[in-house]
Amino acid sequence: DMDGLKDSVVRMLAGEAVPIHIGTFSNDMTTFAMKDDVLTLLVHLGYLTYNSINETVSIPNKEVSREYVNAISTMNWHGVADSVESSRKLLESLWAMDADAVAAGVEKAHEEISILQYNDENSLSCTIQLAFYFAREYYTMVRELPAGKGFADVCMIPRPCHLDKPAIVIELKWDKSAVGAIEQIKEKQYGNALKDYQGNLLLAGINYNRKTKKHECVIETMQK
């Protein structure tokens, strides 16, 4: 995990952009003094997209994201690789509305990705998005902005070739309640990402209890 490289890759796999300073790059494939040198090389190779306005990098698409997962599977990043592998089963549990299995799956992802501590909104959302990594096969993932003491919710919009799948909204809470998370989704009218969506909808409220270090989940279904 040179200079936080592992943390940056995990966050990008979860769909985030991470800051980068490209000025130290030596323009070769052998001299790496810090994390930013590695990330800059990956930009040159086409494996990352550079945003010159925000000075951040991100993984450009799900095809390239798969290549990162393939690479990680051959490295000693077992927690990350295991979480990605478990994400298929977690998505199936969500479709089946098995709230206990979803809570247990997110719990497992949090334990495996130990570098992502629940100390801010981004870390909680990042864990959720990595836990549901496999959902990108079926959905476009949209992360809504945080509001108040709630945490950024995650909207999953079915891709055109998977319209038989329900759209999903996941609201995250910290030291509150999963039921309250569901109610907040309804109050916000499912989030801006789904304002034009019509069809089956799954609402999932997930709460993390700091004292017990446990997750709870409530899932509801409805037609929008």
Image (spheres, rainbow, N blue to C red):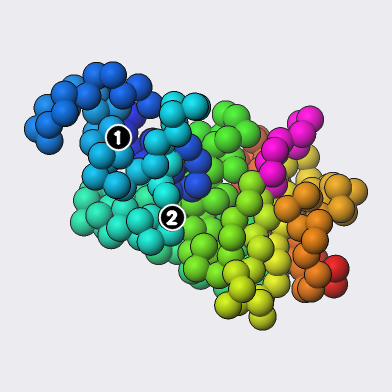
- For the point 24% across and 45% down, which residue is it? 45
On the question of residue 45 being in view, the answer is yes
**Front residue (pair 205, 198):** 198
Of helix, strand and loop, which one carries label 1? helix
- For the point 72% across and 57% down, which residue is it? 169
Which residue corresponds to mark 1?
39
C-alpha separation, residue under disc 2 versus residue under disc 1: 16 Å
Classed neighbour count for the residue bearing mark 1: other residues with Cα under 10 Å, few (<14), some (14–19), many (≥20): many
- In the rendered image, the residue lying farthest to the right is 187
Total residue callouts: 2
Where residue 51 sits, quadrant-wise, is top left
Q: Provide the residue span drawn in magenta.
A: 144-153
Where residue 219 sits, quadrant-wise, is bottom right
Q: Is residue 150 magenta?
A: yes
- In the rendered image, the residue lying farthest to the front is 52
In the image, residue 212 lies at what x, y percent? Answer: 64, 40
Q: Is residue 170 above or below residue 177?
A: below
In the image, residue 163 lies at what x, y percent? Answer: 66, 77
Q: What amino acid does circle 2 point to?
A: Asn
Q: Is residue 92 magenta?
A: no
On the question of residue 101 being in view, the answer is no
Mark 2 touching mark 1, by CB under 8 A?
Answer: no
Which residue corresponds to mark 2?
61
- For the point 78% across and 49% down, which residue is it? 192
